[in-house]
């Protein structure tokens, strides 16, 4: 049975199904008045969400990034200090470790110089 495109009100309100509107039958949404139930279009969606920002959404369980939240999650103890106002971390090397590292650098430098003399 072939379907023929018709115009006007030929279907009783509420009795139309998706099968009736299949594009292979030649009937599309352009043949139906929207009324108060508007069809989806990209332009309509874009106009509704185009002016929105994250401040229009509640955070829920996934909190937004803020400097204050990130800085509150960091801390430093011992030789490491942290300024949560500026976000700057500082490390003060203990004097004994500093002396050991300095001696190691001097030793490596002297060893390299001695190696060069042998060549």
Image: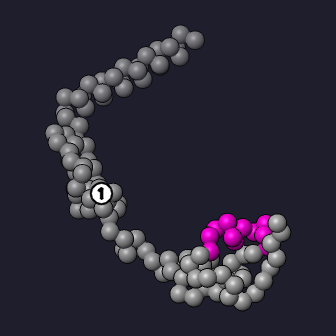
Tell me the element at label 1: loop
Nearer to us in this view, 16 or 107: 16
- The residue sitting at 23% across, 37% down in the picture is 93
Residue in the picture at 26% in, 59% down: 69
Residue 44: % across, % down = 58, 80
Q: Residue furthest top?
A: 118
Residue 13 placement: quadrant: bottom right
Residue closer to the observer: 73 or 64: 64
Q: Is residue 6 above or below residue 24?
A: below
The residue sitting at the left extreme is: 78
Q: Is residue 113 left or right of residue 107?
A: right
**Dominant secondary structure, magenta:** helix
How many numbered marks are there? 1
Give the image quarter of residue 108.
top left
Determine crowd level at label 1: few under 14, some 14-19, many 20+ residues with C-alpha closer than 10 A.
Answer: few
Would you say residue 29 is visible in this rendering?
Answer: yes
Q: Which residues are magenta?
A: 16-26
Tell me: residue 19, above or below residue 42. Answer: above
Query: Which quadrant is home to the N terminus?
Result: bottom right
User: Could you tell me residue 51's position as x and y percent?
Assistant: 48, 81
Q: Is residue 34 left or right of residue 10?
A: left
Q: Is residue 66 visible?
A: no
Kindly identify which residue carries mark 1.
61
Q: Residue at x 43, y 16 (%)?
A: 111
Residue 26 or residue 111, whichever sits in front = 26
Rendered residue at 67%/66% (across/down): 19
Question: What colour scheme does the image use?
Answer: one colour
Q: Quadrant of residue 15?
A: bottom right
In the image, residue 21 lies in the stretch drawn in magenta = yes
The answer to if 98 sits in the magenta stretch is no
């Amino acid at each position: 049975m072939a379907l023929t495109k018709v115009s006007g009100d030929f279907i009783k309100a509420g009795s139309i199904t998706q099968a009736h509107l299949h594009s292979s039958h030649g009937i599309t949404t352009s043949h139906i008045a929207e009324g108060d139930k508007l069809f989806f279009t990209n332009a309509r969606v874009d106009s509704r969400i185009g002016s929105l920002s994250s401040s229009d959404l509640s955070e829920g369980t996934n909190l937004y990034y803020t400097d204050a939240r990130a800085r509150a999650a960091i801390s430093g103890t011992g030789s490491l200090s942290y300024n949560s106002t500026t976000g700057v971390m500082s490390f003060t090397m203990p004097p004994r470790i500093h002396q050991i590292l300095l001696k190691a650098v001097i030793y490596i430098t002297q060893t390299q110089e001695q190696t060069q003399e042998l060549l």
